[in-house]
Image: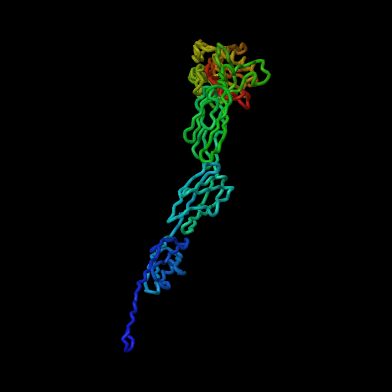
């Protein structure tokens, strides 16, 4: 610069300074709903700072205070903010990324009395997890460790807990259902005899898990095993014990009583006693093959014989006609002579699977080679030119025993025994013979029914007679020496049961 005429000069030095601006950091990542983020604006010879370009306000907002830029995340998305300094109009751009956070709701199902359950919490961009609202403590308790939520059941019921994550403060409800459990057993106790096969108990219940034996029974009395829902009990020896079974979900237990009875042999228990003071003491009641029986004999020559408690059915035999020789002869052979065999045949259906043999009462009572003698070998005899089976007295032993034990039927009963009656009527000079089948009356007295007859005389010539008769049928069965009694006391209300 020159001044006037003197030509004096002055020099002015001009220094142009270039400003700079820097954002630290140049980009941020925040979480929707989460905490604010700050950016520091630095630089050289910067002037006043202003926001040149605002971020998209639905994603984030920005506030500048001095050299601090505060960014508030709003919703997931990407945007940016530009800051300008006033000296050199330099700018700095900050990229903003806002991430969404979430926790996935879940349902936890447990069982009252059961074990705790742990689940992994899932979600999006989660921070640290905490239980912000605990469940109802009388139903369940809960704890969180990292992403593992552990729920412990207390009692049956439904409740919820709320989880919160720290990045975006997202929350989620975890539903907790604690289910009741129960265990049942059918039957609730087992009673068996030594020598019986395995007994089964069906296990069930509500919301039950797998069944296991918690407490074994006394293995000297019985052993047990479980397969699925079936408990198998195998008798070992006489005694009482219990087994405790548990279901696996709620650990509910049930106790099943086990009674093993000593094996009772029928021949040791079923003993008739003519001097017994009660009906069952004289002749115990027995249930076998869906029929009620009484004890008739139990000794070496008879074995163990049971007689039906009453007549099992009525049986009609014979046919009524007079004066016909052909019919008479047919009835003689088919009815009178065959009566004993017919009676024995009619009672065969009452033998069942355990009995050795069966006969009609009034037949031969003593055994032959361990069985009944059902052969009708009484022989025959001619009476007035016709072949009659001989009479017999086989009935006497049964009849005397029935009367002594007081086990008469309630109506007249056929006896497997024949009677031949011969007579002469001097006034008419008539000889006659009658073929009769014996019966035992409900009073115990012995009687008979005429089935066939023939009479001869000078004035009448030959006359024939046949008749019809109906009486009750009463079977007698022979039981084996190893027959077992499974239950009962021998009374009419609680008869011994033979399996």
Q: Nearer the viewer, residue 130 or 20?
A: 20
Return the x and y of residue 21 as percentages of the image width and height.
38, 68
Residue at figure coordinates x 34%, y 74% from the top left? 16
Q: Quadrant of residue 274?
A: top right
Q: Is residue 318 visible?
A: no
Q: How is the image coloured?
A: rainbow
Asked if 20 appears above or below 388 in the picture, the reply is below
Asked if 405 appears above or below 15 in the picture, the reply is above
Report the residue that reaches farthest toward the front. Answer: 6
Q: Nearer the viewer, residue 127 or 160?
A: 127
Q: Nearer the viewer, residue 459 or 234?
A: 234
Report the residue that reaches farthest toward the bottom. Answer: 5
Q: Quadrant of residue 82?
A: bottom left
Return the x and y of residue 30 as percentages of the image width and height.
43, 61
Question: In the picture, which quadrant includes the N terminus?
Answer: bottom left
Return the x and y of residue 311 as percentages of the image width and height.
58, 24
Q: Nearer the viewer, residue 442 or 193?
A: 193
Return the x and y of residue 42 as percentages of the image width and height.
41, 66
The number of discs equals 0
Q: Is residue 373 left or right of residue 85?
A: right
Q: Is residue 443 visible?
A: yes
Q: Is residue 308 left or right of residue 148?
A: right
């Amino acid at each position: 610069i020159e001044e006037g005429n003197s030509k004096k000069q002055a020099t002015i030095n001009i220094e142009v300074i270039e400003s700079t601006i820097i954002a630290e950091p140049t980009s941020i990542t925040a979480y929707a709903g989460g905490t604010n983020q700050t950016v520091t604006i630095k630089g050289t010879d910067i002037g006043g700072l202003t926001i040149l370009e605002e971020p998209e306000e639905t994603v984030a907002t920005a506030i500048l205070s001095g050299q601090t830029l505060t960014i508030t995340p709003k919703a997931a998305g990407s945007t940016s903010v530009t800051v300008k300094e006033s000296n050199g109009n330099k700018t700095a751009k900050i990229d903003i990324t806002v991430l969404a956070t979430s926790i996935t709701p879940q349902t936890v199902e447990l069982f009252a009395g059961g074990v705790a359950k742990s689940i992994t919490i899932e979600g999006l961009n989660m921070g640290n997890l905490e239980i912000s609202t605990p469940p109802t403590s009388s139903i369940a308790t809960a704890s969180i460790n990292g992403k593992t939520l552990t729920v412990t059941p207390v009692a049956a019921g439904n409740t919820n807990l709320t989880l919160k994550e720290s990045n975006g403060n997202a929350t989620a409800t975890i539903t907790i259902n604690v289910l009741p459990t129960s265990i049942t057993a059918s039957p609730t106790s087992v009673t068996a005899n030594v020598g019986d096969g395995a007994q089964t108990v069906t296990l069930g219940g509500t919301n039950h898990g797998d069944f296991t034996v918690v407490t074994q029974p006394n293995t000297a009395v019985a052993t047990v095993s479980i397969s699925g829902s079936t408990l198998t009990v195998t008798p070992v020896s006489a005694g009482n014990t219990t087994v405790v079974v548990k279901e696996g979900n709620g650990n509910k237990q049930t106790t099943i009583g086990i009674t093993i009875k000593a094996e009772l042999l029928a021949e040791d228990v079923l003993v008739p006693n003519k001097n017994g003071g009660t009906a069952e003491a004289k002749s115990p009641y027995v249930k076998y093959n869906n029929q009620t029986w009484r004890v008739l004999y139990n000794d070496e020559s008879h074995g163990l014989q049971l007689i039906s408690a009453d007549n099992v059915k009525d049986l009609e035999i014979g046919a009524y006609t007079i004066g016909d020789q052909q019919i008479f002869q047919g009835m003689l052979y088919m009815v009178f002579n065959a009566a004993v065999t017919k009676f024995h045949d009619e009672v065969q259906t009452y033998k069942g699977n355990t009995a050795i043999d069966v006969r009609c009462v009034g037949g031969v009572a003593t055994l032959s080679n361990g069985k009944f003698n059902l052969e009708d070998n009484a022989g025959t005899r001619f009476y007035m030119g016709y072949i009659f089976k001989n009479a017999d007295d086989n009935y006497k032993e049964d009849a005397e025993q029935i009367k002594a034990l007081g086990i008469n039927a309630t109506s007249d009963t056929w006896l497997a025994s024949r009677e031949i009656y011969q007579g002469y009527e001097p006034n008419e000079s008539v000889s006659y013979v009658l073929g009769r089948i014996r019966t035992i009356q409900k009073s115990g007295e012995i009687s008979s029914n005429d089935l066939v007859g023939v009479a001869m005389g000078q004035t009448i010539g030959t006359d024939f007679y046949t008749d019809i008769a109906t009486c009750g049928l009463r079977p007698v069965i022979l039981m084996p020496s190893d027959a077992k009694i499974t239950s009962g006391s021998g009374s009419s209300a609680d008869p011994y049961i033979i399996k």
